[in-house]
Image: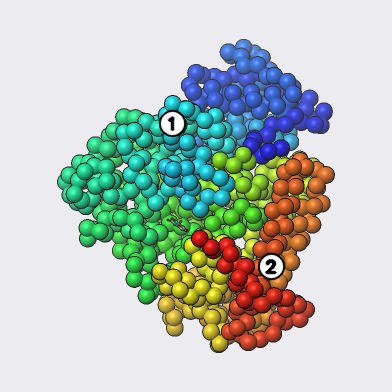
Amino acid sequence: DDGYRLWLKYDVVADAALRKEYQRAAQFIVAGGESATLKTAAEELQQGLQGMLGKAVPMVGEEKGRKGGIILRTDAAAAKNAPLGPEGYRVFTDKQNIVITGRTDAAVLYGSFALLRQLQTRQPLTNLALTSTPKIQHRLLNHWDNPNGTVERGYAGSSIWKWYELPEVIDPRYRDYARANASVGINGVVLNNVNASARYLTAEYLQKVAAVAGVLRPYGIRVYLSVFWAAPKTIGGLPTADPLDQKVRQWWTSKTDEIYRAIPDFGGFLVKANSEGEPGPQDYGRHHADGANMLAAALGQHDGLVMWRAFVYKADAKGDRFKAASQEFLPLDGKFAPKVLVQVKNGPIDFQAREPFHPLFGAMPRTPLVLEVQLTQEYLGFATHAVYLAPLIKECLDADTHAKGPASTVARVVDGSVDQHAVSGIAGVANIGADRNWTGHPLGQANWYAYGRLAWDHTLTSQAIAEEWTRQTLTTEPRAVATVAGLMQQTRSIYVRYTTPLGLHHIMGQSIHYGPEPWLAQSDRPDWTSVYYHRADSEGLGFDRTATGSNALKLYQPAVQQLWGNPQTIAPDYLLWFHHVPWSQPLSTGRTLWDELCTRYYTGADSVQWLQQQWASVRPQLDAALHADVAARLQTQHKEALWWRDACVLYFQTWSRRPIPAPFTPPQRTLADVKQLVDLYQLR
Ligand code: BDP
């Protein structure tokens, strides 16, 4: 198994009795219409059923009193009994047929994938009553792909988009990509990097973008583009990109009209401006809302959106970077045009293995906020460490902002229910590339899958998603499913333990963001070093963000301040995010800070061996090649977990001056040894 088929395997159902039962329930398909999307839904069913049932299932024109088939029906009235919205579906048994219905063709497509999932996970097909409506409207993947085929922070090969071949050559992979996305309900993709090239907006490239859009459209997926702010200068020949300049506004308006002529269902723009060297409206003394609203005006009557990123931190890094986005965006709440959403990373720094939720969630009631999570494992071990991200994403979604009293979770801020927004969105930075198995690490596929499922329904549990994915992708044998899902569930907390326990953050290798470098003290900006974040000294460890320190904690509601403000009562997982704690301080775990820190580094690294054992135990149930691939990656992971452990305990020991506590054995190598090893990875 080379992993190419992802979770859409559709291998034959081995259990003969169950296969018979499925065959009886799926003898024919009525596509119920001619639209490209309905045809696609019917073809997906046909392909999936043929694989799982081991026999062809014919498409018939109408049911004509026949029983034992599957009927697709787009029906505006389908929503009458249930508030399905435009994309929700119902799959139910009626007169011994299975009916898949929804208000739009896309809804029927989603229902078709839900039915296939029933079979893939070996559920019964009798008396079906599946109803589901997405909680968030715009469920996007963000590609950080460049025109030259590289992928920023991509670890699965080059970009899947072959710009030099488009629009003439349509790689069949585009369609398989669309199938995978539609199967989990992803309905929009930003094709290019937020550090954008203006090239995508040229007439030449818009034809290419239109060709990709044509492949994705039948799957209910719209394309979006990241825009380079200074495009009116670079490709428009204007002397300025000032958003209040009439000529600039006119340029964007006609460019947008041109885009919609080529791609009538274009989704809109994603913008990274005045961040990390990117140009933006502040270059002209304007603020972010001036820029976003100008693009919203350019969209005019077109059905598109502007997603404006809040990932900004000013050039002077004297303050606490934790507060930077809030300082810039809080004053702008209420100033954005209706078509604008502000896109906010899950945490205030940058996709660390664990972050407190971003303080902007719940703090901008008049602005719809898009949650941005990172599926590509920039800070989580690239494609060698197994880290199942659903627990990380859920931790953020379930966090309570207390913005409108208890239960004002980030999920409910994002889905619009806390502040009654009519528009809502979520974005996952894609982890896929041209590698045959799409994600490099085979288990990385689960992160793409889980993101889509949570974007559709944030109330699903990460355990349930892990089981569902495993059944479809690896094995249906119940004990093996339990073992794989069980180990997946632990991976993220294990990764946190051996890299950044107790709320440590941003102590990784400079610029490539790989491996440990807690000693990093020099960089172009202080907030790109490690010492800025961990603040180790002879007294203790951690960043004081209470009133005695940067007071970033003040950005949260009082209930949250209470939760995190007291070093005695804060959950140890978040401790060093907010407090500078003495080495000798006893924690709620019963150990001193130093001993707890060492315990987590040691047990975290040891737990990778537990992952290896668990994985070894399912070998008989899994495809041999795939099993061996993951087993080899786990070996690398263990080796590197030991680097992390040794680098961090030895480095922090230079400050704590305390021994490694029993029962742990001090590292065999010196700090200089580990530094040398880690430095190898930073060589340019
Ligand atoms: C950081 C990445 C950088 C991205 C930036 C962003 O290191 O490559 O451009 O985020 O999100 O995590 O804009």
Residue 156: image location, x then y, percent: 57, 46
Q: Which residue position holds label 2?
A: 642
Q: Tag 2 or tag 1, which sits nearer the N-term?
A: 1
Is residue 571 at all visible to an observer of this figure? no
Q: Residue at x 68, y 59 (%)?
A: 637
Disc 1 crowd rating (10 Å Cα; few below 14, some 14-19, many 20+) is: some
Q: Residue at x 57, y 20 (%)?
A: 31
Q: Quadrant of residue 575?
A: bottom right
| Marks 1,2: beta carbons within 8 A | no
Residue nearest the viewer, comparing 532 with 420: 532
Left or right, 261 with respect to 51, comes to left
| Ligand 1 image-quadrant field | bottom left
Question: Circle 2 — which element?
Answer: helix
Q: Quadrant of residue 208?
A: top left
Please identify the residue farthest to the front as the structure is shown.
684
Disc 2 crowd rating (10 Å Cα; few below 14, some 14-19, many 20+) is: many
Question: Circle 1 — which element?
Answer: loop
Quadrant for the N terminus, please: top right
Residue type (three-letter) at the residue carrying disc 1? Leu
Residue nearest the viewer, comparing 48 with 417: 48
Dot 2 beta carbon under 8 Å from ligand 1: no
Q: Which residue position holds label 1?
A: 166
Residue type (three-letter) at the residue carrying disc 2? Leu
Residue 120: image location, x then y, percent: 70, 35
665 over 658 or under it: above or below: above
